[in-house]
């Protein structure tokens, strides 16, 4: 795994997760290779990121139905911050108050194949270019991330007006790009596959994810350690079949 040059404080990896979902309720708890999808994601990030430099946190709601989310986070030794069900931004602000950091990586629990190498590269680019915000671009849907400085999150909180601003963390930035110093991490040619769905938002997505991962030889290495390039090959093979 590539290593990013970090600030003194750990970078927060904030996994936003809630049990409720319009299209696939409870998907974070769906079994993927024998463990909940949230657990699969946490283990993937824990495996691929240097613990010295990164801190993984789950941000979920204070609704009773999200009690299992907190329980599974704690099972993996990960902190869980709970807040307003409908206000994602408020949950992030509560998280960064509890865990101060310079940089904060947004990860969603419906992306179990989020790539640690992309996270490292985004953080490195953020620091080298002194950016407020960066998003990965061109990677398969579900592999990438975006990263916010804590200062930017405070500015977003001050500027947020609409329900979309509070639900979609980067909405303010994308609608006012000239106000912020932003950047993109573009996928290399072999991973430039933005139409490839590697996220879980529908029953069909989950079936595809399960089918791809079940072909791995887990005696050689755990499924959550699959490199992104190999995962792409598996998904493309399923599409051909």
Image: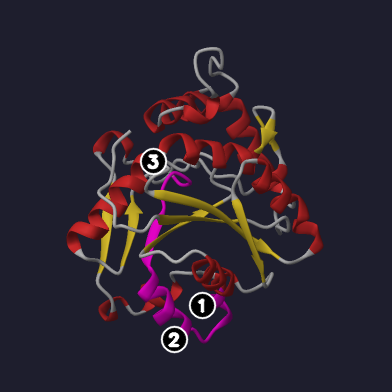
Foreground: disc 2 or disc 1: 2
Foreground: disc 2 or disc 3: 3
Tell me the SS state at disc 1: helix
Q: Is residue 159 magenta?
A: yes
Residue 189, percent from left and from top: 25, 37
- In the picture of the structure, the residue carrying the numbered disc 3 is 50
Tell me the distance, in whole angstroms, between the alpha carbons under discs 2 and 1.
9 Å
Tell me the distance, in whole angstroms, between the alpha carbons under discs 1 and 3.
32 Å
Position of 113 with respect to 119 (left or right) is: right
Foreground: disc 1 or disc 3: 3
Tell me the distance, in whole angstroms, between the alpha carbons under discs 2 and 3.
34 Å
Q: Tag on residue 165?
A: 1
Discs 2, 1 touching: Cβ within 8 Å: yes
**Span highlighted in magenta in the image:** 141-166
Q: Is residue 241 above or below residue 162?
A: above
Name the foreground residue: 116 vs 202.
Answer: 116
- Whichever of labels 1 and 3 marks the residue nearer the N terminus, that label is 3
Name the foreground residue: 7 vs 103.
Answer: 7
Q: Is residue 75 above or below residue 174?
A: above
Task: Please report the residue visible at 27 percent of the width from the left and 49 percent of the height from the top.
Answer: 186
Task: Please report the residue visible at 29 percent of the width from the left and 40 percent of the height from the top.
Answer: 3
Residue 209, percent from left and from top: 58, 34
Circle count: 3
Discs 1, 3 touching: Cβ within 8 Å: no
Q: Confirm whether residue 24 shows in the render.
A: no
Task: Please report the residue visible at 70 percent of the width from the left and 54 percent of the height from the top.
Answer: 23
Tell me the SS state at disc 2: helix
Tell me the SS state at disc 3: loop
């Amino acid at each position: 795994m590539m290593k990013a040059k970090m600030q003194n404080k750990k970078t927060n990896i904030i996994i936003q997760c809630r049990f409720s979902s319009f299209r696939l309720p409870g998907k974070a708890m769906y079994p993927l290779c024998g463990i909940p999808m949230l657990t699969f994601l946490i283990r993937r990030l824990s495996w691929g990121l240097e613990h010295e430099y990164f801190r993984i946190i789950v941000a979920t709601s204070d609704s009773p139905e999200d009690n299992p989310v907190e329980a599974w986070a704690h099972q993996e030794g990960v902190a869980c911050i709970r807040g307003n069900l409908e206000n994602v931004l408020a949950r992030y602000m509560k998280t960064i108050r509890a865990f101060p950091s310079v940089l904060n990586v947004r990860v969603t629990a419906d992306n179990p194949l989020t790539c640690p190498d992309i996270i490292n590269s985004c953080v490195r680019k953020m620091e080298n270019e002194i950016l407020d915000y960066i998003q990965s671009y061109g990677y398969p849907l579900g592999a990438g991330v975006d990263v916010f400085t804590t200062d930017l999150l405070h500015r977003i909180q001050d500027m947020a007006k609409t329900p979309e601003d509070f639900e979609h963390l980067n909405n303010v930035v994308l609608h006012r790009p000239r106000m912020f110093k932003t950047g993109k991490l573009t996928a290399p040619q072999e991973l430039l596959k933005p139409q490839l769905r590697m996220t879980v938002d529908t029953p069909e997505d989950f079936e595809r994810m399960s089918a791809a991962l079940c072909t791995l030889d887990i005696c050689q290495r755990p499924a959550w350690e699959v490199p992104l390039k190999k995962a792409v090959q598996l998904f493309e093979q399923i599409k051909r079949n």
